[in-house]
Image: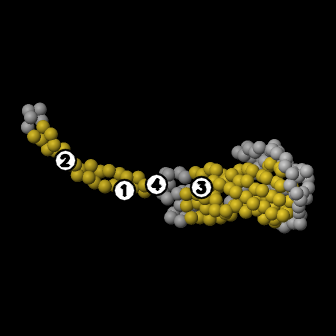
Amino acid sequence: MISLTSKQSAQISFIATPRETVTITPPLTMIIESGVAVFSFAGTHANDWTRDTLAFPVGEPCTEALFLSGIAAASPASFWMPLEKGVSTSTSEVNVEVSGADSAGNPVTLGGSVQIQQVFPPPIGCAVDSATVAYSAADGQPVLTLALAVFGETSFLIRVSYTAHIAMAEHRSIVVQGGATTVKQA
């Protein structure tokens, strides 16, 4: 189970300044929230994807009638893949022969074997498969749902950056605490 780190955490910083005002007809309120979700999601399968979802409220509380639609984009922002776990090695023996001459000029051939060790890192990877915004009656506001995946048991997805766009059927100016850009109508 993944749990979200609080927006008030010192690990996260947001830009909370409205950027631009444009006119849209009919009047709507557009909330554009950008941020970073901080969590820890570990892979559990050595040679396959581990999948889970992370959902959290975005925008501001509203009624289902005011929520028109939402769209989001997200991408991995930080991952950790410690190679000391799951590293495999292979040792092979190679026969070596060296030819040359001694100090008197007589031909000399020496032979032997050398062992070479190869290191193979484990299969690793991380992905955000989808990012969707939908109204949640339980939360009383829009919720962003991220479909996450990590490959291999040594992969950890730690942060995802996201941007959620929420269209509301009303006309007002708002700024969402924790990092948002608000587009308002005249």
Name the image quarter holding residue 19: top right
Distance from the alpha carbon under mark 2 to that under mark 4: 31 Å
Q: Earlier in the sequence, mark 4 or mark 1?
A: 1
Q: What's the amino acid at mark 4? A: Pro
Q: Position of residue 5 (x, y in %)?
A: 72, 52
Do the residues bearing badges 4 and 3 touch, measured as CB atoms within 8 Å?
Answer: no
Secondary structure, mark 4, is loop
Residue extending farthest to the top is 103
Residue drawn at (12%, 41%), measured in percent from left and top?
Answer: 108
Do the residues bearing badges 4 and 1 touch, measured as CB atoms within 8 Å?
Answer: no
Q: Residues within 10 Å of mark 3 (few under 14, many from 20)?
A: many
Residue 179 seen by the camera: yes
Q: Give the residue pinned by disc 3.
A: 156
Q: Residues within 10 Å of mark 1 (few under 14, many from 20)?
A: few
Secondary structure, mark 2, is strand
Name the image quarter holding residue 104: top left
Viewer-side residue, 92 vs 171: 171
Secondary structure, mark 1, is strand
Q: Give the residue pinned by disc 2.
A: 97
Residue drawn at (64%, 59%), measured in percent from left and top?
Answer: 128
Q: Earlier in the sequence, mark 4 or mark 3?
A: 4
Q: Quadrant of the N terminus?
A: bottom right
Secondary structure, mark 3, is strand
Q: Give the residue pinned by disc 1.
A: 90
Distance from the alpha carbon under mark 2 to that under mark 3: 46 Å
Q: What's the amino acid at mark 3? A: Phe
Do the residues bearing badges 2 and 1 touch, measured as CB atoms within 8 Å?
Answer: no
Distance from the alpha carbon under mark 2 to that under mark 1: 23 Å
